[in-house]
Image (tube, grey):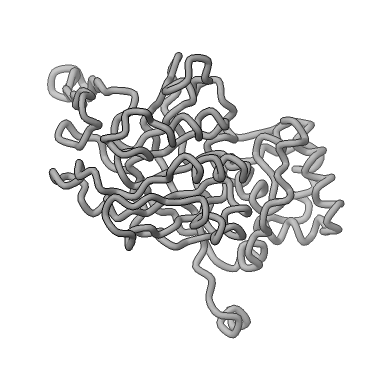
Amino acid sequence: MDVILPIFSQRLKQLRRDRKITQKAMAELLGKTERHYQAIEAGCINVPATQLIFLAGYFQTSVDYLLGGDPLSQNLEKAPCPAAWKERKLPPMIIDLTHTITPEMPMYPGSAAPSIKPTGSLTRDGFRETQLTIASHTGTHMDAPSHMLPRGSTLEVLPASQFCGRAVVLDVSDLPPRSVITADYLREQNGTIRSADFVLFYTGWERKWGTGAYYDDDFPVPDQEAAKYLVSCGLKGVGTDALSVDTLRDQQFLAHKTLLDGGLVILESLCLKKVVGRTDLMLFALPLKFENADGAPVRAIAEFRDFPEEKEMEAL
């Protein structure tokens, strides 16, 4: 997908000027000629979506703002990008945070297992096609406010900017069984959390995926006060590698309701082992778009850069 909008060109130019960056420097950043970059600012050349996402991260704003969204969506107060990202010294690393959907995968108790049936074959039809029947909260998925709230929003009406942003992964896997993640614990991480759009909890339950132990009701969850604190941080969402942000025995769903009522989305059954402890990643978790979506499977990915020490940077 390419983007070519006059307002995009105008906002890109203004962001560059506000930071006193030359067109030549921007061209080098993007790996383009100066004339090519000038044509981008003039609105004469299409911009690939991947480049658009990079520019949003570089200027610490949102894709929504670059494409003409409300100026309040800039999020310019977020923590600055690492210098190595700005200098484009290193290529990004992309990590898949998503479980593969299979008929045998773990499901929340009471939810139907996925059905995957071939409906077209190369030998008979000349093409392959598959009929996929799944519940809205299958596998690695996102909960919409409407999942628990009578007047909550459904996923398809939320802006795409709600589904991506800076994320931190907090390691709570060392907590004793049936532990509660408290507001006091989160306040200790205040500096890290306040610079993020998403807080993701690594409970260690990902290691139990595909076994009966994944249903063990011992994983750490935030209590209601912790959920209220997370809402106060102005986040876009909260996630976990466990089956839920509430224990299976808690049918009041207090963490769910508090987070969703605060305008956050919830990600569950993430794969976080490869990014545990990271505070510098960009999260993209795009839900399947269908009407009245109280939840949907997502393909969640993390983008980050491994930064060498300063001496190594000088040698690059």
The quadrant of the image that shows the N terminus is top right
Tell me, yes or no, if residue 35 can be seen here.
Answer: yes
Judge left or right: residue 235 versus residue 213.
right
Q: Quadrant of residue 52?
A: top right
In percent of width and height, residue 184 lies at 52, 55
In the displayed structure, does residue 246 sit left or right of residue 154? left
The residue closer to the viewer here, 277 or 302, is 277
Q: Nearer the viewer, residue 309 or 135?
A: 135
List x then y, in percent, for residue 104. 14, 35
Residue under the point 59% across and 83% down: 315
Q: Is residue 114 above or below residue 187?
A: above
Of residues 304 and 27, the one nearer the viewer is 304
> In the rendered image of this protein, does residue 181 appear above or below residue 8?
below
Q: How many marks?
A: 0
Residue 152 % position (x, y): 52, 20
**Any part of residue 127 in sight:** no
Looking at the picture, how far across and down is residue 24, in whole percent? 79, 59
Instruction: Name the residue at 57% across, 50% down.
Output: 166
Q: Tell me if 219 is positioned left or right of 64 in this view.
A: left
- Please tell me which residue is depicted at 31% across the width and 45% down the height of the picture: 242
Split into 4 quadrants, where in the image is the C terminus? bottom right
